[in-house]
Amino acid sequence: MEHRDLFGEMNKIIKEMKRLNDAHPEGLDEESNRRVSELLEEGRKIGAELDPVMRDFYRNDPVRLAAWEDIMQVCSDEDEEEEE
């Protein structure tokens, strides 16, 4: 089984999105917008991989599990808004 550093990958995505935003204070150009869309999709995929791992990790900690579930619900709500 291949081990992936999902948190490290997510941190790289966040840094790249921040870099793009900082490089375009006036607003993103078409190419940057495409890249942000790609990064968001990568982040969603990583989140989907992390979800069962984190639910298992926090299964005996109801407060942290509830916080994780709230995070995942916000992500799900944003996905639904984009589909509309």
Image: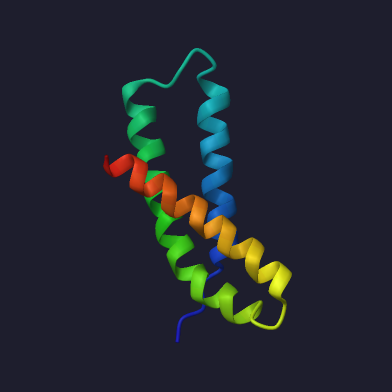
Task: Tell me if residue 7 comes above or below residue 41 in the rendering.
Answer: below
Colour mapping: rainbow
Image quadrant where one finds the N terminus? bottom left
Residue 54: image x %, image y %?
A: 59, 73
Res 53 quadrant in image: bottom right
Residue with the most extreme top position: 26
35 or 41: which is nearer to us?
Answer: 41
Residue with the most extreme bottom position: 1
77 or 32: which is nearer to us?
Answer: 77
- Total labels: the figure holds 0
Task: Tell me if residue 10 comes above or below residue 22 in the rendering.
Answer: below
Q: Residue at x 48, y 61 (%)?
A: 47
Q: Is residue 48 left or right of residue 25?
A: left
Res 59 quadrant in image: bottom right
Task: Tell me if residue 82 comes above or below residue 75 in the rendering.
Answer: above
Task: Tell me if residue 66 comes above or below residue 28 in the rendering.
Answer: below
Residue 23: image x %, image y %?
A: 54, 22
Residue 84: image x %, image y %?
A: 27, 39
Residue 35: image x %, image y %?
A: 37, 37
Q: Residue at x 32, y 23 (%)?
A: 30
Q: Residue at x 50, y 76 (%)?
A: 52
Q: Is residue 50 left or right of residue 32?
A: right
